[in-house]
Amino acid sequence: MMTTTENRSLERGVADTAVQQDDPALIRRRTITGVLVLPLFFLIALPGLFLGALHAPAPHDMKVAIIGDGASSDAIATQLSARATGFEIHRVVDAESARNAVRERDIRAAYDPATGDLFLASAGGAQATEAARALFSATAQSSGTTVRVHDVVALPASDRLGTSALYVGIGAIVGGFLSGLVIAMVAPTLRVRWQLLTLVVMSMVIAGIETCYGWVIFGMFPGNVAASAAVLAGTAAVAGLVTLAGMRAIGPAMVMVSILVLILAGVTASGLPVQLDMAPDFYRWMHEILPTPRALSALRGVAYFGGDGITGDLVVMGIWGLAGLIVLALTRHRTTVPGMPAMTDTWADEAVVVGAAASAAA
């Protein structure tokens, strides 16, 4: 039997524990600690991913072609296959086939040793285009042939570096990520269908802003405004949907998952900062399975190549979108963010969102 004094001591201890658990100062300290983890995360993940892709770009299984089926074409193809490190040498029958293959991004460049014609697409990426040009320029020089370059898909005059699609695409990804985060944090009790509707509207607004930058204000792209706006809206929607579904499933840990998978991996594995056939296989593998690298690739395909070769990109984006919808359906009865019971405090909500926004913008 416990004495009256012991009972009072036990009750006082339980009460103190409850007060401590609900202490606003303690809640704020925990929130601040969680937000400050993001810069440490960036310290490790950001330089690791970007340096791995950008520090030493070199041809890596880059597909190029020799035009023709004559003896001279056979000899050059055999020679390059043996000596051209980092290149895959293919054959095409004529110049028209070469143009089509370059335009559809099946090969990086094609060279006709009989005429000296070199077909390439500068819109496909500066580093890879220059590597292919250097290879065939050296080949032509060794045989005394003058190279005549045909830029099948040239960059517009307003986008000589070919990086504008990357920047407007990043805007769509970050905007979508923040949209999903805000909806999950600010309106966790909202029905899933209304959360989805809100996300769709926000994605359309984001796409409108980025389209205004790229096509109206700066005139960076020659055409395909409607298709590009649709890709930007899809990019924002997929990024937001994945983030919203993840927040409902695993809670605040999804912030770092989204930043890593959607933003950092999305940029480095997209093929826009450095082309995938100039980067290690790891980035090509990420490009195959992640949604935002595919979204940026689709945006480049629409903005520069008239939409050729983007079917695979759209399929991967669709699979991720469907997965997000399934997670939302499974968590439709949840009215709080998992692992964040204290997040009924407006200050705490804002702290998490602001911290995530600052990290994403960095």
Image (tube, grey):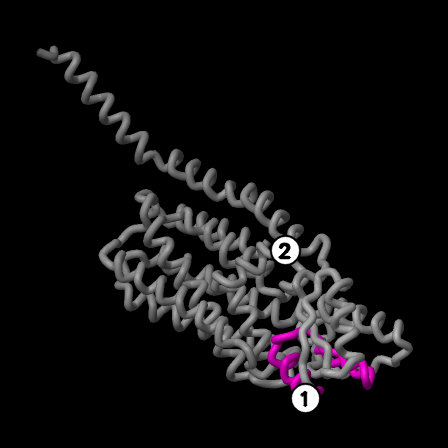
Query: Is 97 inside the magenta-drawn segment?
Result: yes
Distance CA(mark 2)–CA(mark 1): 31 Å
The quadrant where residue 315 appears: bottom left
Residue that lies at the very extreme toward the bottom in this rendered image? 96
The quadrant where residue 19 appears: top left
Q: Which residues are magenta?
A: 94-120
Q: Which label number is shown at residue 287? A: none
Q: Is residue 23 above or below residue 108?
A: above
Q: Is residue 82 left or right of residue 333?
A: right
Q: Is residue 185 visible?
A: no
Residue at x 73% of width, y 75% of height: 160
Name the image quarter holding the N terminus: top left
* Residue 359 on image: x %, y %: 54, 51
Q: Give the residue at mark 2.
A: 280
Q: Is residue 101 left or right of residue 4?
A: right
Q: Give the residue at mark 1.
A: 96
Near mark 1 (Cα within 10 A), the count class, few <14, some 14-19 or many ≥20, is: few
Near mark 2 (Cα within 10 A), the count class, few <14, some 14-19 or many ≥20, is: some
Who comes first in sequence, dot 2 or dot 1?
1
Q: Amino acid at mark 2?
A: Pro
Residue at x 32% of width, y 47% of height: 338
Residue that lies at the very extreme toward the left in this rendered image? 1
Residue at x 72% of width, y 59% of height: 58
Q: Nearer the viewer, residue 87 or 74?
A: 74
As helix, strand or loop, the secondary structure at mark 1 comes to: helix
Residue at x 75% of width, y 70% of height: 78
Q: Nearer the viewer, residue 342 or 52?
A: 52
* Residue 254 on image: x %, y %: 42, 51
Q: Amino acid at mark 1?
A: Glu
Q: Nearer the viewer, residue 54 or 83?
A: 83
Q: Is residue 232 above or below residue 117?
A: above
